[in-house]
Amino acid sequence: MEEKKRSLTALDEYINKVYVLVLLLIPGACQCAGISYTFLRIMGWMLPVSWAALIIFDITCLIYLVFAIYLIKTGFDELGGVKPSSLKTAKIYIVVLMLIQWNFIQYMVPAKDFWGLAFLFLVLSTFFLDYKLVAATSLEIGISLLIAWFVRGEILLPAKDEMYITNLLDRVVCLGLALPLTVLLTYLVGRFIKDEIRRNNEKVKSMLDSVQALSESLLQAGQALSKITENENASVEELSATSEMLLEGSNRLGGRTKASMENLNELEEWKNVVADNVGKVEQTSSDLRNKTKENEKQLAALRKINGEVSQSMVTTTDVAKKLSKAVEQIGMTINLINDISDSTNLLALNASIEAARAGETGKGFAVVAQEVGNLANSTQDSLEDVSKVIQAVQENVQEITKYVNDNSQKLEKQNEYFSNVYTGIQDMAQLLDAAADAVDAMGEAHDKQAAVIQNTVSINKEIADDINKENVQFQSINDMVAGNVNDIAAISNQYY
């Protein structure tokens, strides 16, 4: 389909474009005029125009536009050009459309300068380069204007003032000259352009016929030479195909070897990364083992100190118990002193009684007895204060003993926890020793693996070098075969 379209002449291409353009522009211009007049009527700027005429005009414009689209859709043939029948129908349609719509607008819209639009429709009709179409359009527009001027001269003609004759003469001269000259211009342009395009097409066709005849002669001469070189060509092509197959296989093998080399190089790079990480793990394991041993020593020292503190707490508890017993003995002694004080006080009372019986002779003894009684009372008061202090000391000693017992139990629990932690750290140290041994074994295995990878890389490099040498040799053979083919082709071309 595309090749058939390319065979169209420049004139055909021009008609294709103009066919669509004019069929859309003329009905489209009428449709735009209807829309504009309707808007002006709505705004109250075209009161003399009746609504009925305006609606009929709008409907007919829409019908004309739809029919124009139908002509465009059905106007082309399978070669991509406009059908002659469709082109003829379109021209008749344009003549009829401009006749009807021109008179419709002319009698519907009272405008004195409406005649100027005649040139718009006339110019649109000239696109087809058909002077008959332009002549028909010019004739119908000119006659319609003359009739309208006689029928509605008071509306369509200039105002009857001092310039009436001049304005009327200008219109007549303008239309009388412009319409025929437009027809003449269309005739001359259409005729000479079409003739020139036709002559060019004939020249091109004649040249193509000559070229085709020359090609057929060269083809016959070349066929004779082609039979002579067919055998050599076949053998050379077979050798070339074999060489290309070998070269292709070698290139494919080289590509795989290259991919293998890239994988091994990447593996070697990862080997370095793994080696670094293995070294870091070994160093970390060693540091962790040393730190664990140090923590084990510190926990052992702490366990020893904790045992000493526990022993000291036991001793403190014993001392507190002894102090409590000593305080109890002091309480017993104070009770004894208190009994003695009571006895002394009773003895002083008896002495006072006896001194009173003795009369004057016993007054001195009575004073002594009174002082002894006072001393006994003072001693008793002091003993009461001492008893209170001893009681407070006993309470404090009991509280200290309670705290010491609690701390002793807590220390025993703490010693138990320390013992568990110490045992756990010893177990962890054993596990770390095992992990460190495993890391050392992994490092040795990694070193052996690295040596194997390095050896594989070296072997692959040697294989790649050998393949590259073979590729160079195959390429030389291929170039030689290609040179022979080109020589044969050059010989064949000399006879074609």
Image (tube, grey):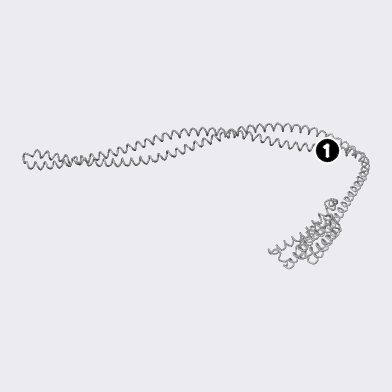
> In which quarter of the view is residue 217 placed?
top right
Q: Nearer the viewer, residue 110 or 415?
A: 415
Q: Amino acid at mark 1?
A: Thr
Residue found farthest to the left:
360
Q: Residues within 10 Å of mark 1 (few under 14, many from 20)?
A: few
> In which quarter of the view is residue 351 placed?
top left
SS under mark 1: helix
- On the image, the x and y values in percent for residue 174 come to 81, 57
Name the side, left or right, on which 452 lies relative to 190.
Answer: left
Q: Nearer the viewer, residue 463 or 22?
A: 463
| Residue occupying image coordinates x 85% and y 35% | 481
- On the image, the x and y values in percent for residue 493 come to 89, 39
Image: 142 above or below 299: below
- On the image, the x and y values in percent for residue 296 come to 48, 34
Which residue corresponds to mark 1?
242
Image: 358 above or below 38: above
Image: 131 above or below 362: below
Q: Nearer the viewer, residue 471 or 285?
A: 285
For the C terminus, which image quadrant?
top right
- On the image, the x and y values in percent for residue 176 come to 84, 59
